[in-house]
Amino acid sequence: MVSALEGKIKLVLDPQTTKRSWKYRSNANKHAWGALNSSCQLVTCSRFVERNRQNLRSIVQSCIQCIDESERLHEKVVAASVKFMNALDEFVWQEILPHHVLTNALVACMSLSFNVSARVLFHQI
């Protein structure tokens, strides 16, 4: 099940998706958004987290990539990625995720924050 959710997230990250029709891209965005929201619910269960460590790492890395590519991806997908990362508890961050993933997550979130701030500032001038 987790690998199916992960596949839906990775589909929206595939560079070939941008070359497809608007209908295909729209469906990819909907599926990724739904997969991320479903994942948010799943990570609240500690048994699920224990059994799916490797897949969680992969989903977090996909979320980081979604945030990194926020300029290209649909806003709902990026917001759901941030929501998923926010739903992870301290145990997941400390025990399951390697330190380089944590570093990448921080850089991606800071980059997103900077991009949003720059857009707000640009529109105010």
Image (cartoon, grey):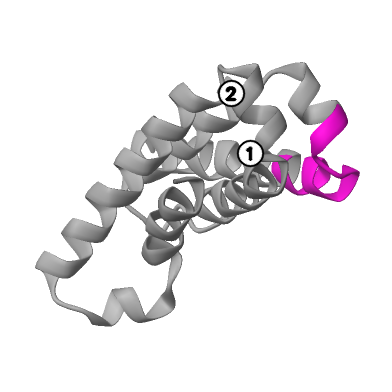
Q: Can you tell which of label 1 and label 2 is closer to the viewer? A: 2
Q: Which residue is mark 2?
A: 86
Q: In the image, what residue occupies the spot 50% across and 58% down?
A: 69
Q: Amino acid at mark 1?
A: Cys
Determine crowd level at label 2: few under 14, some 14-19, many 20+ residues with C-alpha closer than 10 A. few
By secondary structure, the bulk of the magenta-drawn segment is best described as helix
Q: Amino acid at mark 2?
A: Asn
Do labels 1 and 2 touch, CB within 8 Å? no
Q: Is residue 96 magenta?
A: yes
Mark 1 vs mark 2, CA separation in Å: 11 Å
- Seen in the picture, residue 47 relative to 23 is either above or below; the reply is above
Quadrant hosting residue 19: bottom left
Residue 79 appears anywhere in the view: no
Q: In the image, what residue occupies the spot 30% across and 39% down?
A: 34
Q: Which residues are magenta?
A: 95-105
Q: Mark 2 or mark 1, which is nearer the start of the sequence? A: 2
